[in-house]
Image (cartoon, rainbow, N blue to C red):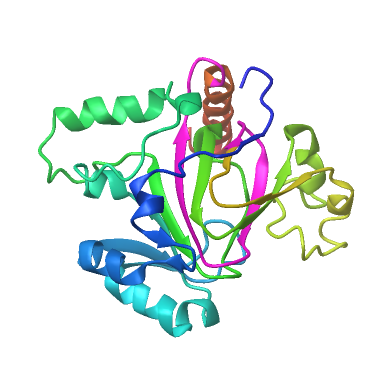
Amino acid sequence: MAWNLPVVITNVGTDWPARVEWCDRSGLRLEILKARYGHALAPVVGKSIEYGDESRDDVAVATYLDWLASGLAEADQLYLKDWHFTRDFPKDAIYTTPKYFADDWLNWWWDQKAATLPATSVGLDDYRFVYLGPRGSFTPLHHDVFQSYSWSINMTGQKEWLLFPPSETPKLLDKFGRVVLSNFQEIDPVRFPRAHTAKHLRVLQPPGAALFVPSGWYHQVTNTATTLSINHNWFNAYNLPLIWAYFQEQLLAVEREIEHCR
């Protein structure tokens, strides 16, 4: 964390209920998930070209599991993501935050806020997520919210990560220096003339491997098989200065945009 570099830690979460009860050697135990959580609603997105532009609908988990089993989810590239499982099922301890990532100020703050509000409060959120997607489902190139850290552990399946250090970000911008490339595997050389020169890391993440994604690292993620993962966004003393700098940059950008209104 002090060096703000990615790390892979093996043999993590192999005894979690999310691994032992939800999965077996053949993959997901769909009927178990459907029986326990099929009534819940979770966000499902369609195939996206740019980060954040995808269609998003709340779908019953049972319905999505049927799509996954029938092949429809893969055919239409439907991805269940950003499911606030811990928020929705606080009594179901399906995992424990690994000790390496336990100093989490962001989710601690949300927990303190939640303790003072009714359970039905609108906007009661955290930054703990379950992701479930078929082979080929994809998250375009982006950095994490607020320049936070993130960690990800697959319960089953495999992800391919492309990770770009902050020093390479200028190469990912278009020729006007404004828009970031969305898909490193489909580069328009006229619009993004320097993108192909961007140095990056490629990581294949199997089940039981925790990937630490540092602040400000752009990354692109593809599920190479049907994959269920647990993910957190978070920050602590190491990256708080980077987050503060990011908020200041965003404030200045807003002020520039509304300057003509003063």
Describe residue 85's horizontal placement relative to residue 226 as left or right.
left
Q: How many marks?
A: 0
Quarter of the image where one finds residue 108 = top left
* Residue 171 location (% of width, % of height): 82, 44
Q: Please tell me which residue is depicted at 52% across the width and 32% down the height of the picture.
A: 148
Q: Please tell me which residue is depicted at 49% across the width and 68% down the height of the picture.
A: 26
* Residue 162 location (% of width, % of height): 71, 50
Q: Please tell me which residue is depicted at 54% across the width and 32% down the height of the picture.
A: 149
Nearest the viewer among 212 and 196 is 212
Question: In which quadrant is the N terminus drawn?
Answer: top right
Report if residue 89 lies within the magenta region: no
> Can the viewer see residue 178 in this picture?
yes
> Can the viewer see residue 258 in this picture?
no
Q: Which residues are magenta?
A: 212-239
Q: Is residue 169 above or below residue 82?
A: above
For this orientation, the residue located farthest to the left is 118
Nearest the viewer among 21 and 97 is 21
* Residue 239 location (% of width, % of height): 56, 21
Nearest the viewer among 178 and 124 is 124
Q: Please tell me which residue is depicted at 69% across the width and 20% down the height of the picture.
A: 3
Report if residue 213 lies within the magenta region: yes
Describe residue 188's horizontal placement relative to residue 140 as left or right.
right
Quarter of the image where one finds residue 214 = top right
Describe residue 68's horizontal placement relative to residue 118 as left or right.
right
* Residue 256 location (% of width, % of height): 58, 34
